[in-house]
Amino acid sequence: MADRTFYLTTPIYYVNARPHLGHSYATIAADAMCRYRRLRGDRVYFLTGTDEHGERIAQVAAAAGVTPQAYADEISGAFRETWQRLGITNDDFIRTTEPRHAKVVQAILQKLYDAGEIYFGEYGGWYCYGCERFYTEKEIVDGKCPDHQTALTFIKEKNYFFRMSKYQGWLIKHLEDNPGFIQPERYRNEVLGFLREPLQDLSISRPKARLTWGIPLPFDDQYVTYVWFDALINYFSALGYPDGALYKEFWPHVEHLIGKDILKPHGVYWPTMLHAAGIPLYRRLDVHGYWTIGGGKMSKSIGNVVEAFELTDKYGHDAFRYFLLREMNFGLDASFSEEAFVGRLNADLANDLGNLVSRATTLIVNSGGVSRVPADSELDDLERQVRDRFARVREGVDEAMAEFAFQKALARIWELIGLLNGYVDVSKPWELAKSAAARPRLERVLYVLGESLRFLGIVLAPFLPDAAGKIRRAVGQTGEPKLSDAAWGRLAPGTPVQKLSGLFPRVDKEGRSQEEQIGKMYAATRTSNRPPTERAGLADPATTTPELANSVSIDQFSKIDLRVAEIIAAEAVAKSKKLLKLTVSLGDSQRTVVAGIAVHYAPADLVGKKVVIVANLEPAKLMGIESQGMVLVGSAGDRWAVLTLDRDLPPGARVK
Ligand code: MSP
């Protein structure tokens, strides 16, 4: 990616359907790419918008009993609002019903007409109203549109045609000479495949007698412009073609991100139109695959359309972005399911990233912060691996992003996260904290962790903008992140660090967050298990004072060995909704305690907490894990609270 100026467009979306998962993927992918390029320090322009003319829009508007303009205004507004809510950083939003666009479409039509590239003729063919295009005999499947599976209509009418056929040889040569013009390669091959058949001229008008919802041809007011000829031009009408400063600066650097469904218009019509008009071609077409649901097409009629907001409102924008970018191999189809989404959210975000951030910030804060930059000669093997991985991750991410392979970029970053989690386990900073002699080693560990979080806060920014911002702030970084700062050794000693836990709360299989679960449990106990007076809220056994009948003597009580214990690691117990496996330190020893608090606490929230345990409780096996003690927890209905100290005491201190 030597080019330091970058202009990226998304498809402009038809206003006949509300924004859904498919549109969101394209826009989020483009947003992640533009954020990445800005992070590199590149000059970036990012365009999206809506495609508002044509027969389909006129039809849906008529069915809804409103004018096409009113219909377009509403749905275009929904797209714009969706992108705002998802935090999309587009620089402009173009609508094809805007005068600035119509003006440029007419100028290009006139230019091509004057140059003899457009002629008047008659054509008869099989037309799909859904696709707004004619199908050749070869493309028709069982007499139907291969895409919509609906019957085609034979239309014979006089129209204006663009002499596209004459550019067939030129386009084949261009694709052969420029192997990277369309990527991934399979789509370049697909376009070369289209071009093995004779290329027809392209009908670029519709008679007004049949359709009025379009841009009038400048040279014949009885016709409006064909929707694809109108829509493609948005890519430079938005830049103020031909004299606008934006056009001059950004057009030479344009790439179009599209889905595979619109490959032909972008891979064949568009380059030939540009070439005929004497306008430089786009630099590259980046083609993504399709999201399917349960292996099938997402469609309104099947009723499986995933609306963008449903998931982001439920799980957060960052989690939604992460899933889409990580799960789809760019260029191939991917299957969407909420289960797969929740799986990734829990494994990659809550466990791997969230836990690391929580453990690292807690350790740093509890151990007095980052005090010094360790000398290179001090670093052990694993620490050198972490240090060297910074540059490798950056290279790997850069290579992946050069081909829009978001999944690879994220995989590279997660390899580092895995390495760091392993590093915490192996270096056991909680043990180092116990002896003064181990202080220099502890300082190194704290530095490696703090510095790694600073690095992650930068490289994650394009993919998880909110979480990355929180990570940067937790390790005292202010201002806009820069990729050039993602280099080892820049975290300054004394940088203020804050604990950051619960970055990505875990979600259970049914998709409920822990807060919702607590609410549900409470509702269940209130209605089913309690006497009517309590159900009416008159008394809550959890908060009423117990009788003194079962009193114990002070001697009996003193047999219970209560100790301050520091939680140094916490993890969910497989196949259990309630249990957490805690590793606690009692100062001179460590032990495992299993606690039934998973509904109320995420593992990451517990690490670093000093709690009170019953240290001499008989060991018991819970789900195959031996628990050596019990954590004291208070509860009042749905509120559970782990007992912590109001002043600091060392782990192992007695509680009486
Ligand atoms: N208006 C045209 C594009 C004109 S560009 C000059 C159009 N609009 S659309 O609303 O149908 O959007 C198509 C694009 O939305 C696809 O190319 C793709 O980027 C995205 N997706 C729509 N459904 C999709 C999936 N099921 N999966 C992935 N992306 C899909 O075509």
Image (spheres, rainbow, N blue to C red):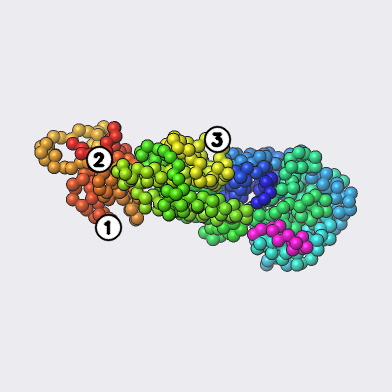
Residue at point 82%, 44% (across, down) = 106
Task: Please state the horizontal and vertical placement of residue 538, each as a whole percent of the image.
Answer: 26, 32
Q: Marks 2 and 3, how far apart in space?
A: 40 Å
- Mark 3, Cα crowd under 10 Å, few <14 / some 14-19 / many 20+, is few
Residue at point 39%, 40% (across, down) = 364
Tell which of 451 and 300 is nearer to you.
451
Boundaries of the magenta span: 172-184
Q: Marks 1 and 3, how far apart in space?
A: 48 Å
Question: Of the residues under marks 2 and 3, which one precedes in the sequence?
Answer: 3
Tell which of 116 and 531 is nearer to you.
116
- Mark 1, Cα crowd under 10 Å, few <14 / some 14-19 / many 20+, is few
Name the mark on residue 468: none
Q: Is mark 3 within 8 Å of ligand 1?
A: no
Mark 1 or 2: in front is 2
Question: What kind of element bears circle 1?
Answer: loop
- Mark 2, Cα crowd under 10 Å, few <14 / some 14-19 / many 20+, is many
Residue at label 2? 564
Contact, CB < 8 Å: mark 2 with mark 3? no
Give the side of residue 425 with respect to residue 116, left or right.
Answer: left
Name the mark on residue 624: 1
Question: Can residue 477 be seen by looking at this rendering?
Answer: yes
Residue at point 57%, 44% (across, down) = 483
